[in-house]
């Protein structure tokens, strides 16, 4: 079975589950009517199902390669990207002043999910470009905006972000790439960057790198980092790609998955760059790009989960062993819980996107706090769900899932990276219990109040589901209060299970909304989530509050398996 974009599922969530109507009611996004949203989802769905999905396996079997210093893309990828660009999909949420559609992030993330389900390796290109567009819109000079944004938004050029170095991974402040002023307003960038997604390609005429580097005399750590635009080809007086810049692709990484996405080791040898934002404020500009990408990565997880689940259901319907295996209780358990988790992860991601949209449209601090709180949850739960569901897809296929020709294994190999990049899910969880609880738990409690109020309101129509959700939310509230009394290292020890538990409560909240506003299928799915997924919170919250002593009390030698007296 080929991938079918889940247009109706996304449309239902936007109409009935998350507050997208509030977004459309603002002056900024007044054009995003329900009819417009549905039309956009329909068109994007056709592109994903009919153009991008058929290229997915070709990208896996015939990876991008480096030939004579140039990256050659997988078969059909150039045509696929051209279809994305010509449809205007790179600039869905970009500023209309520079050629974007100016539509809400909720729609952009919906499109991103469908593209990811269709072809994750190819979708990574517009994802990174969109993040660069956002960083430039917020931080670049008018001159840089005028030159780069129209080209990036149209898809004529593509964008990357260059953070990681061999000695500076998650500890970005340890980077050693240098930026020397050239005396003419430009800078000379020297250093090496690794894991650069789509760091070069033949699908666009120029590749524009946002590079973190350190100016002479700058402070150590993140406070001394600046951000620079370093294009592959330096634009000429007409804004077209001119002479080659002093940078090159050293090699491509051989990866577990996403083979069609070239992951580059980049070398900069006095390359010409332009400062983006203020000196030594590069991390603020880069975080604008990273936060956009984090939600996008969460939706990538959802997209791959949807595709893997579709394939597993189709196989289970066709595979006969004492009848179609979709009737077997354990297979049905796997498929039902996977579908329930995909719905929850999708709703959380779109709720986060609508909060971002409301903050942009109104400037309201509560919307900003909600978006900030939901971002690490959407990223981590979306990608964890993608990995779980893709793994389940292999299991449903049985031995055939381990055979590449079915395509089930590709989803698992491709999605596995998503819990690692744009900040590992452990980092997302530490951010949640650290920065996001630094307000004394205000943002968390406002969300939990909303969940509890929803459960109370649903008591008359759906008492069983409402009671299960209310209990889970109350238990989570108590755990949150307990965490607030603990030092950060102790919080960090339980951060991952705490984030997962919070995600499940939010997922239950959105399932309950769907059960009240949808049909019997939504009610049945909500029952599965409440009965089989939400109860896992008891174990996770016990771990979240277990403290740190047991972890510090076990020696490194014991972890290595050395139990000698």
Image (cartoon, helix red, strand yellow):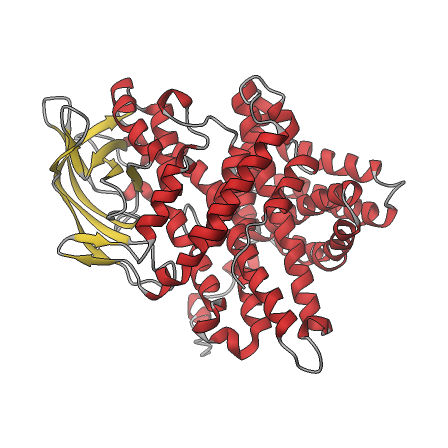
For residue 22, side relative to residue 139 (left or right): right
For residue 531, side relative to residue 357 (left or right): right
Name which residue lies at 29% across and 31% down: 151
Name which residue lies at 10% across and 27% down: 182
Foreground of the two, 296 or 552 = 296
For residue 284, side relative to residue 463 (left or right): left
Name which residue lies at 21% across and 35% down: 230
* In the image, residue 333 above or below residue 561: above
Name which residue lies at 61% across and 51% down: 500
x and y percent of residue 486 in the render?
59, 43
Foreground of the two, 83 or 551 = 83
Residue at the far right in the pictured view: 460
x and y percent of residue 498 in the render?
61, 49
Q: Quadrant of residue 313?
A: bottom right
Whether residue 159 is visible: yes
Foreground of the two, 369 or 146 = 146
Q: Quadrant of the N terminus?
A: bottom right
Q: Quadrant of residue 533?
A: bottom right
x and y percent of residue 348 in the render?
61, 42
Whether residue 430 is visible: no
* In the image, residue 274 above or below residue 174: above
* In the image, residue 500 above or below residue 89: below
Count of numbered tags: 0
* In the image, residue 421 above or below residue 99: below
Q: Quadrant of residue 432?
A: top right
x and y percent of residue 433 in the render?
56, 42
């Amino acid at each position: 079975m080929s991938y079918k974009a889940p247009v109706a599922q996304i449309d239902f969530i936007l109409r009935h589950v998350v507050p997208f109507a509030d977004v459309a009611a603002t002056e900024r996004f007044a054009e995003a009517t329900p009819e417009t949203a549905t039309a956009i989802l329909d068109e994007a769905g056709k592109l994903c199902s009919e153009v991008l999905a058929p290229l997915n396996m070709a990208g896996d079997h015939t990876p991008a390669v480096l030939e004579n210093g140039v990256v050659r893309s997988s078969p059909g990828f150039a045509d696929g990207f051209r279809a994305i660009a010509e449809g205007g999909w790179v600039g869905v949420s970009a500023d209309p002043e520079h050629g974007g559609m100016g539509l809400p992030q909720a729609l952009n993330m919906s499109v991103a999910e469908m593209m990811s389900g269709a072809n994750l390796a190819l979708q990574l290109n517009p994802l990174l470009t969109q993040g660069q567009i956002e960083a430039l819109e917020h931080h670049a000079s008018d001159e840089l905006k005028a030159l780069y944004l129209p080209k990036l938004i149209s898809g004529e050029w593509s964008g990357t972000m260059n953070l990681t170095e061999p000695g500076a991974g998650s500890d970005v402040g340890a980077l050693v790439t240098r930026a020397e002023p050239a005396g003419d307003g430009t800078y000379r960038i020297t250093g090496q960057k690794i894991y650069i997604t789509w760091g070069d390609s033949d699908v666009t005429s120029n590749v524009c790198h946002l590079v973190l580097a350190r100016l002479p005399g700058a402070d150590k750590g993140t406070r001394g980092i600046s951000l620079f635009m370093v294009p592959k080809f330096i634009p000429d007086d007409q804004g077209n790609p001119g002479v080659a810049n002093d940078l090159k692709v050293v090699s491509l990484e051989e990866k577990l998955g996403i083979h069609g996405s070239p992951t580059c080791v980049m070398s900069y040898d006095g390359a010409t760059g332009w400062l983006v934002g203020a000196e030594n404020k590069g991390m603020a500009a880069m975080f604008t790009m990273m936060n956009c990408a984090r939600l996008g990565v969460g939706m990538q997880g959802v997209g791959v989960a949807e595709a893997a689940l579709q394939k597993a259901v189709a196989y289970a319907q066709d595979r006969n062993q004492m009848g179609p295996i979709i009737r077997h209780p354990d297979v049905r358990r796997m498929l039902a819980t996977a579908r329930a988790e995909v719905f929850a992860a999708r709703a959380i991601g779109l709720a986060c996107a609508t909060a971002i949209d409301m903050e942009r449209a109104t400037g309201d601090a509560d919307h900003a706090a909600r978006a900030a709180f939901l971002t690490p949850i959407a990223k981590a739960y979306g990608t964890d769900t993608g990995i779980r569901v893709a793994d389940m897809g292999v299991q449903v296929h049985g031995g055939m899932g381990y055979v590449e020709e079915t395509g089930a294994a590709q989803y698992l190999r491709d999605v596995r990276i998503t819990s690692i990049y744009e900040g590992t899910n452990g980092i997302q969880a530490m951010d949640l219990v650290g920065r996001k609880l630094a307000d004394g738990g205000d943002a968390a409690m406002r969300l939990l109040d909303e969940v509890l109020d929803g459960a109370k309101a649903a008591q008359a129509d759906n008492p069983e589901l409402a009671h299960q959700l209310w209990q889970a939310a109350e238990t989570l509230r108590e755990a949150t209060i307990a965490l607030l009394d603990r030092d950060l290292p102790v919080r960090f020890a339980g951060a991952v299970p705490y984030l997962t538990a919070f995600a499940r409560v939010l997922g239950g909240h959105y399932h309950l909304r769907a059960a009240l506003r949808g049909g019997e299928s939504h009610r049945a799915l909500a029952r599965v989530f409440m009965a089989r997924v939400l109860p896992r919170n008891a174990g996770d919250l016990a771990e979240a509050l277990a403290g740190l002593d047991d972890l510090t009390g076990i020696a490194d030698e014991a972890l290595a398996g050395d139990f000698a007296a």
